[in-house]
Image (spheres, coloured by chain):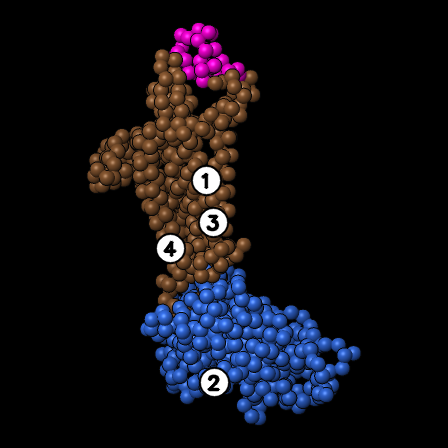
Amino acid sequence: MAQVGRSAKPNDVTTYLIRRVAQAILMLVIVSMVTFSIFFVVPRLAGGSAENLAARYVGRTAGEEQIAQAAERLGFNDPLPVQYGRWVKAIVVGAEYDYGPGVEHCPAPCFGYSFLAQTPVWPDLVDRLPVTASLAVGAAIIWLLGGVSVGVISALRRGSFFDRAAMGVALSGVSLPIFFTGLLTLYLFSYTLRWTSPGASFTPFTANPAKWAYDLLLPWVTLAFLFAAAYARLTRAGMLETMGEDYVRTARAKGLPERVVVTKHGLRAALTPIVTIFGLDVGLLLGGAVLTETVYSLPGLGKYAIDAIGSNDLPRVMGVTMLAAFFVVIANLIVDLLYAVVDPRVRLN
Amino acid sequence: MTASHVAVTEVSRGTAPSPSFLELRDLRIHFPTDDGLVRAVDSVSFQLERGRTLGIVGESGSGKSVTSLGILGLHNRRNANVSGEIWLDGQELVGASPEQVRSLRGKKMAMIFQDPLSAMHPYYTVGNQIIEAYRVHNSVSKAVARRHAIDMLGRVGIPNPDKRVDDYPHQFSGGMRQRAMIAMALSCDPELLIADEPTTALDVTVQAQILDLMRDLQEDFNSALIIITHDLGVVAELADDILVMYAGRAVEYGSATAIFEQPQHPYTWGLLGSMPRIDRTRTERLVPIKGTPPSLINVPPGCAFHPRCRYTDRTNGACDTVVPELVALPGTHLTRCHLTAAQRSEAFDADVRPSLELR
């Protein structure tokens, strides 16, 4: 960021930062409203009553009277803004949930309370996040390095055997779904060759880094393959364009070694769209890699969401949704700020 | 591959090193394409000494830029066949290894490109780009290189160089950008400077400033200068010698005085006739050259210019069958035309001189 300070007035940069952060916060508020609406307003619009909503929170044998009581207790009869306000307030200061037999305290930040499991959602999310983050970050590093290198070499040797083979593999990478490649690699590398962990286990990085990496290796590679393919194609297209630019010819005319011409001049310019997509992809994955986590039975946010959906545990689904949305918004913010670092022409606007 | 093979055989023919600072001997640059062989440069030869300026003139696609990129070794050997000889200060470049040519590039020979906005990297400050050019060939610290960059920006007439050095190319005006480009090219004191249409992208008022600047700098550095342009006004300002190119070949080569006062080739006449001049009466029309430059894949047989030439009927059909040789005229003047000296002088006096009449 030192560069930013030097070229534009520090004031402008601060203003830009504040404006972007404010926009991100506003975005989060809107997302929370949309999420709230999906879970509490849309069912109403579709003709559901407060009792229909409440029926999900009581036992199967509950009578109409109990359901009506539950609806009242959970505040489903209050005006929607009040309900929304209560939900937001819970996130900020926590809440008390009355589940009938007793009252359960849900400390802030309270992203809902699972009546099914009788636990608040937030601690679960905090538990699950390291798994998903480990998976996403590890895979992201592999696919970024792999995809970009393959794309660069393909572009420099356009039409060569390497280029054609790599682009063929990339096409299959984009086309093959993870539940196919995932099961295939599990069968091959874990069960037949016994090179990798058979999944279903996660060791925290802090406990044993080697075991952590060993357990995640196969999910990383499989997930990275899917993304690397897209990145290779994107990088190749970008490099083909930038290597034909006049400024690359200028770099050569200066007598720079070809390696410097390619990386510092060609790749640097081709990297802008890749940085954008990369930020968004990682943000999206942090909300849970549903298929990968399911195939490898990793206890991450994606698996948590799927399990919650399967058991109709709405507060949990809502909690994951909010967290995933939060990551996407943050990723967008970071990408925007990175853009200003990567491309100096953005800074003045 | 074939390119390097050709290069090796050409060199192994073993001609003597050139006594000139820069000499091109029979340079050919051909690009094999799916549509056929593009003869972008076909047998071009010239010499240039330090402190002298050569203007290479011609329409778009005449091979001017390809020639200059060939001197710098900037053609990709995978898709360009380069043959002939390029002697720079006693060293032959066509047969030299890419690494040898790279070490000369930017240091001994440098290039100023046409459009400085696209020719400078948008993501790096002007200063960083000059520092980079300087540090490839000089092992100095960044701080030293930065002082040098500021010094260079000052020398090419950029105000507040110590502040502008941290600006990006898009923060410069067109003329200032071209000055920065020149500063970058001159940063390693090159002995050969090639300027490819250095003023084409600039305002007319700025053009004159840039031309003045280049003339001054050439005197300071005593470098050999090649100016590539389609604008005869530019070469009239700067050039000692002029090479007129058409369809990849030299059609006329001589001193600037000779080319401007006794042009010998009908194509040169056409270029002179189509040049706007302040000293000509306004009622006269400019005389454009009819037709368009030929495709370099299907170069017309015989003299490549014959489909556009007014005098083809005077040579008994030689024009569209026989490729004319470069013929030496008195002085160091060369021209590639089938017309006899008498025919040329008659045609020039009858058709061309009146429209060029000076003052």
Q: Which mark is residue B220?
A: 2
Q: Which amino acid does label 4 sit on?
A: Ile
| Position of residue A50 in the picture relative to residue A164 (left or right) | right
Indicate the position of residue A326 as horizontal and vertical percent values.
43, 36
Q: Is residue B170 above or below residue B157?
A: above
Q: Can residue A234 be seen in this view?
A: no
Q: Residue A153 carries which label?
A: 4
Indicate the position of residue A238 as horizontal and vertical percent values.
46, 53
What's the distance in space between the residues labelled 1 and 3, CA to CA? 15 Å
What's the distance in space between the residues labelled 1 and 4, CA to CA? 33 Å
Q: Colour of chain A?
A: brown
Q: Do labels 1 and 4 share a chain?
A: yes
- Of mark 1 and mark 3, the one earlier in the sequence is 3
Give the blue chain's letter: B
Q: Which amino acid does label 2 sit on?
A: Asp
Looking at the picture, tell me which residue is in the foreground, A258 or B252: A258
What segment is highlighted magenta in the picture? A48-74
Q: Which amino acid does label 3 sit on?
A: Leu
Q: Which of marks 1 and 4 is in front?
A: 1
What's the distance in space between the residues labelled 2 and 4, CA to CA? 44 Å
Q: Name the residue under label 3.
A: A17
Label 3: which secondary element: helix
Q: Nearer the viewer, mark 2 or mark 3?
A: 3
Q: Which of marks 4 and 3 is in front?
A: 3
Read off the chain for label 4. Answer: A
- Of mark 1 and mark 4, the one earlier in the sequence is 4
Q: Which amino acid does label 1 sit on?
A: Val
Looking at the picture, tell me which residue is in the foreground, B261 or B238: B238
